[in-house]
Image (spheres, helix red, strand yellow):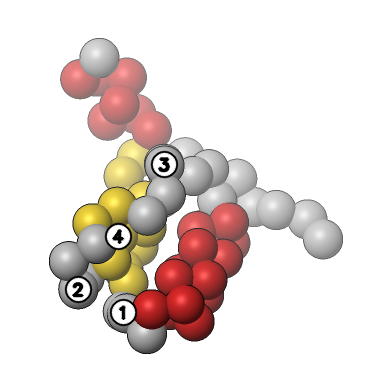
Amino acid sequence: MELEYTDHEYLVECTEGCGEISDWLQSRFLAEQPIKNHSNENSHKCQIIARMTSEIKRTS
């Protein structure tokens, strides 16, 4: 399995009140696993928030 690393980072957030359920991840593929786990455990819906890594460098 090959992971796709892009110039984006991905954050998984529960839309039903739990908040962030992961740290910023380097791959959208990696962000899908916490969604599956959280949805199976709690029947909650989640979303993936993406940001460009260049935005991080500018604001830091």
Q: Nearer the viewer, residue 27 or 34?
A: 34
Q: Residue at x 41, y 41 (%)?
A: 24
Label 2 SS: loop
Circle 3: residue type: Trp
Query: For the residue carrying disc 2, how many other residues have a C-alpha within 10 Å: few (<14), some (14-19), or many (20+)?
Result: few
Point out which mark residue 13 bears: 4
Query: Viewer-proximal residue, 20 or 2?
Result: 20
* Other residues around mark 4 within 10 Å, as few (<14) / some (14–19) / many (≥20): many
Q: CA distance from mark 4 to mark 1?
A: 9 Å
Q: Earlier in the sequence, mark 3 or mark 2?
A: 2
Look at mark 2 in the image and give the residue it sits on: 16
Give me the C-alpha separation between circle 2 and circle 4. 9 Å
Q: CA distance from mark 3 to mark 2?
A: 19 Å
Vertical relation: 22 (above or below) 56: below
Residue 23 or 44: which is nearer the viewer? 44
**Comparing labels 2 and 4, the label whose residue is closer to the camera:** 2
Question: Which-is-in-front pick, marks 1 and 3?
Answer: 1
Give the spatial CA distance, label 1 vs label 3. 18 Å
Left or right position of 49 against 4: left
Disc 1, disc 2: CB below 8 Å? yes
The three-letter amino acid code for the residue at tag 2 is: Glu
Q: Which residue is mark 1?
A: 45
Amino acid type shown at disc 4: Glu
Is residue 58 rendered to the left or right of residue 4?
A: left
Q: Secondary structure at mark 3?
A: loop
Element marked by disc 1: loop
